[in-house]
Image (cartoon, rainbow, N blue to C red):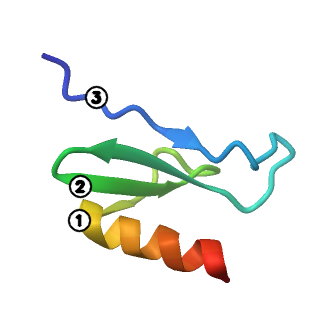
Amino acid sequence: MSTALNWFKSSFSSDEGGQCVEIAAHPAAVHVRDSKDIEGPTFAVAPSAWSAFAAYAATA
């Protein structure tokens, strides 16, 4: 079984070097990283925290 994360950017992101993040969903956590520095640091939050953030961001 692979432990590699499947990272993806929003469909609203372009390849023109903008300010983007990537996420990788996992049952235990949602991992977040800078799309311009894929070897750099990452952080992870509980899926419920990510859902709450995404719901808030959608209304802002």
- The residue at the point 35 percent across, 54 percent down is 31
Kind of residue at disc 2: Ala
Q: Nearer the viewer, residue 16 or 27?
A: 27
Q: Nearer the viewer, residue 9 or 41?
A: 9
Compute the Cα span from label 3 to label 2. 13 Å
The mark total stands at 3
Kind of residue at disc 1: Ala
Outermost residue, bottom direction?
60
Compared across the picture, whether 2 is left or right of 23 comes to left
Checking the image for residue 12, the label placed there is none
Compute the Cα span from label 1 to label 2. 5 Å
Residue to which mark 1 is pinned: 46
Compute the Cα span from label 3 to label 1. 18 Å
Tell me residue 54's x, y (percent). 50, 68
Instruction: Bin the neighbour count of mark 2 within 10 Å (Cα to Cα): few under 14, some 14-19, many 20 and up.
Output: some
Tell me residue 27's x, y (percent). 19, 45
Instruction: Answer whether labels 3 and 2 touch (C-beta < 8 Å).
Output: no
Residue to which mark 2 is pinned: 29
Checking the image for residue 4, the label placed there is 3
Kind of residue at disc 3: Ala
Tell me residue 10's x, y (percent). 64, 47
Instruction: Bin the neighbour count of mark 3 within 10 Å (Cα to Cα): few under 14, some 14-19, many 20 and up.
Output: few
